[in-house]
Image (tube, helix red, strand yellow):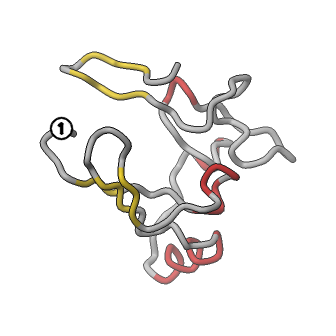
């Protein structure tokens, strides 16, 4: 990422209390990079309408109990009745993944 001035995310405000005030642009602390969140103000309905109107398929893991999909080590299936993000960082006090690759090696930020 060090070569880039900005990067684009798919984060949305409805995805949790830590994202409730998410804006379109954020300065990434300590890097000078900008995070662009073009879907920040979208609701679930907006996303569903966009997928329907553009004939986009659901991710195949959604049917297997993964309504919120992150990286493999931090994501587990969600049981019926659980919040859709309950399968993210199960049993941990995390709200964001923090896995990044540096020179091909996994680096867990904030773990």
- Which of the 4 quarters of the picture holds residue 43? bottom right
Q: Is 111 placed above or below 12 here? A: above
Q: Is 31 placed above or below 90 here? A: below
Identify the residue at the far bottom of this view: 53
Which residue is at a point 82% across and 44% down the rendered structure image? 82
Decide which of 88, 49 is in the foreground and name it.
88
Q: Residues within 10 Å of mark 1 (few under 14, many from 20)?
A: few
Which part of the image, by quadrant, shows the N terminus? top left
Q: Is residue 32 left or right of residue 48?
A: left
Residue 18 % position (x, y): 64, 49
Decide which of 84, 80 is in the foreground and name it.
84
Identify the residue at the far right of this view: 81
Q: Is residue 33 left or right of residue 60?
A: left
Identify the residue at the far top of this view: 105
Residue 75 % position (x, y): 59, 32
Which residue is at a point 41% across and 69% down the rendered structure image? 38
Secondary structure beneath label 1: loop
Which residue is at a point 60% across and 55% down the rendered structure image? 19
Q: Is residue 60 left or right of residue 104?
A: right
- Which of the 4 quarters of the picture holds residue 13? bottom right
Residue 50 % position (x, y): 50, 78
Which residue is at a point 33% across and 57% down the rendered structure image? 8
Q: Could you tell me how many numbered marks the image carries?
A: 1
Residue 45 % position (x, y): 65, 76
Instruction: Read off the residue under disc 1.
Output: 2
Q: Is 2 placed above or below 83 here? A: above
């Amino acid at each position: 990422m060090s070569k880039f001035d900005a990067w684009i995310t798919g984060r949305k405000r409805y995805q949790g209390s830590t994202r409730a005030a998410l804006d379109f642009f954020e300065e990434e602390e300590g890097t000078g990079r900008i995070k662009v969140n073009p879907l920040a103000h979208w609701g679930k309905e907006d996303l569903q309408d966009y997928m329907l109107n553009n004939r986009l398929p659901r991710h195949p893991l959604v049917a297997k109990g993964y309504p919120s999909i992150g990286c493999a080590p931090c994501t587990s299936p969600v049981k019926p009745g659980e919040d859709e993000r309950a399968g993210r960082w199960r049993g941990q006090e995390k709200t964001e993944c923090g896995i990044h690759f540096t020179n091909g090696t996994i680096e867990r930020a904030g773990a």
